[in-house]
Image (tube, rainbow, N blue to C red):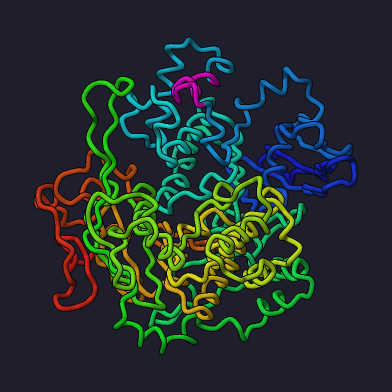
Amino acid sequence: MTAPGSPPVLLRVRNLKTYFVTEHGKGTARAVDDVSFDLYPGETLGIVGESGCGKTVTSLSILRLVPEPPGHVLAGSLIEFEGRNLLALPAPELRAVRGNQIAMIFQEPMTSLNPVFTVGDQIAEAAIIHQHVSRSAARARAIEMLRLVGIPDPDERVDHYPHQLSGGMRQRVMIAMALVCHPKVLIADEPTTALDVTIQAQILRRPRRPGRRDVRGTRRRNRADGGALRAADASLHRGAARRRPADRRAARAAPRHSRPGTGGDGVATRLPVPSAVSVRLGEVRGGGATAARDRDPRTCRPLLARHRARAESAQAMTLVDVRDLVKHYAGERRWFGLGRPQAPVRAVDGISFAIASGRTLGLVGESGSGKTTVGRTMLRLQEPTSGKVLFDHNDVFALDATRLRALRRRMQIVFQDPYSSLNPRMTVEDTLREPLQIHGLHGTVPALLDEVGLDAAFAKRYPHELSGGQRQRVGIARALSVEPQFIVCDEPVSALDVSVQAQVLNLLADLQAKRRLTYLFIAHDLAVVRHIADDVAVMYLGKIVERAPAAEIYAQPRHPYTRALLSAVPEPTPHGTKRRIVLPGDIPSPAHPPPGCPFHPRCPHPKKSERCRTEPPPLRPVPPGGNHLAACHYAEEPM
């Protein structure tokens, strides 16, 4: 019952149970098991938890989008919207609610948007069906919604297809589509997972701005990150809801750049792992040793302290030396290979850095800045346009095929998406045995699995039978199988739960100490990089705009872009007070970079001047003579 004088409940969920019958009817998976909550007008209810705990199924159950079979909502469950039981509504009345009064922002916009229709048509469709407006009026409303969610040039973008937009733009299109009918409840299903922190900051602000006029109640579900926890009133653990506090154990596992215990010397601390996650991992391994290790407070010590002396002694020995690396992609011709070619894409535009043996360089920047291209070109997985990469004094770009194959034993890569990089037709055992056979090595698959924290029984499984964290561990084991010295880690934790991120980061640091590995760690989140990197380089539009030891770049960033990246990292606290620098728009096209400083169109620096628009700033020491480099005319000036 609602208390006198209090607002009426907008959405009431009571005893929700959604079960799935497993293959061949052998059992029942209790995806959602007795979840209850109330949502009031104007309230934001955050539901957080790890993958598999039932967040998405809860959201789909509200709109009756769970496929039947194999799923079904059990009798006795109640989902009540404005006094109407949604579980009992006939199909025509339910269609009038979906997308009109209750709208949903889906997690992955690239798979949720129809690739053969323009984004304008897809936004307008809901207005035509539910609001019964004309096509011209619906198009005008679609343009208005694109403008409202911050899409630049909405009159032009309305006719673009999903593949022509960046990840951040596609997510904003999903928001526009959900808001076009002015719904009363908005369900945001992990709207920022795997996006850049700067785009996350933009996305998390968008529902609030139009919400003052359009949205009266919001449900946001996410993993245990700061963006969700600041608004969270509940957490979801193994399908059951809990009211405050919002799973503080998972929050403590979230990497953040202001974590207590991270010393001013830049030495990263071991990330804590929630005990529930550790127990499951221990059960998988069959003895609980890993669980005990991850819970033991004695192991939560600086990761790099135990090999500080080795790292410092290795500073004089450079293992990887990149000099003026350039990678341009030829522009496509407009009409089926005919006509004048378009401008080349300047993915990497003359960068230089060195990595000493046993150390980690964190390469950070938004999507589209050229980070992955750097890693792939260094390993010669794609040919460079110009420049030089020296690996242990060997010019990688000058080697023939035979010598390059021999050298690749010492250089490996861990890909961003383990699911797409593992062959779905090969078992884990086949995947790990293949490089051993190619290079004539005598390692064993069980030993590799044990080194990355997996039981030998996983050898007989296929990639689709593994979780995201387990697949990433297999990817790491594959890279380790040939006993490399240098590994490119290409965003290895960007799409994983925070607790699984902690496990993978701890694993990489332990392997580095054990095997004396050297890493290029690519990421778009500076909070993640802090826990593993000795040095940090920040990329923007194919160029390095700042490079320094990790301690210096976190204590006193010199470039406005670095400051914006740091400020955009969500803090896992319910009431964060940190001032955010929200960058407008997206990173410009590398085919048409702006003149002068490439960052000037988005730069928030108060001293920005005409000089920034006309004169490219060099990467220079700040202050002179130091090892902190920044490409900004006003790097010495405070913001």
Residues in magenta, as a range: 115-126
x then y, percent, for residue 484: 47, 70
* Location of residue 550 by image quarter: bottom left
* Quarter of the picture holding the N terminus: top right
- In the image, residue 57 above or below residue 582: above
Depth order, front residue of 354/166: 354
Query: Is 634 a magenta residue?
Result: no
Q: Is residue 368 left or right of residue 78?
A: left
Which residue is at a point 53% across and 26% down the rendered structure image?
114
Work out which residue is located at the far top of the displayed protein and give it: 134
* Quarter of the picture holding the C terminus: bottom left
* Location of residue 595 by image quarter: top left
Which residue is at a point 25% across and 53% down the rendered structure image?
604
Depth order, front residue of 299/406: 406
* Location of residue 155 by image quarter: top left
Q: Is residue 617 left or right of residue 21?
A: left
x then y, percent, for residue 105: 56, 37
x then y, percent, for residue 276: 72, 67
Q: Is residue 436 left or right of residue 517?
A: right
Q: Is residue 286 visible?
A: yes
Depth order, front residue of 163/260: 163
Q: Is residue 423 left or right of residue 341?
A: right
Query: Is 125 a magenta residue?
Result: yes
Q: Is residue 233 visible?
A: no
Of helix, strand and loop, which mostly describes the magenta segment? helix
For the image, the number of numbered tags is 0
- In the image, residue 479 above or below residue 581: below
Which residue is at a point 53% across and 30% down the rendered structure image?
113
x then y, percent, for residue 32: 78, 47
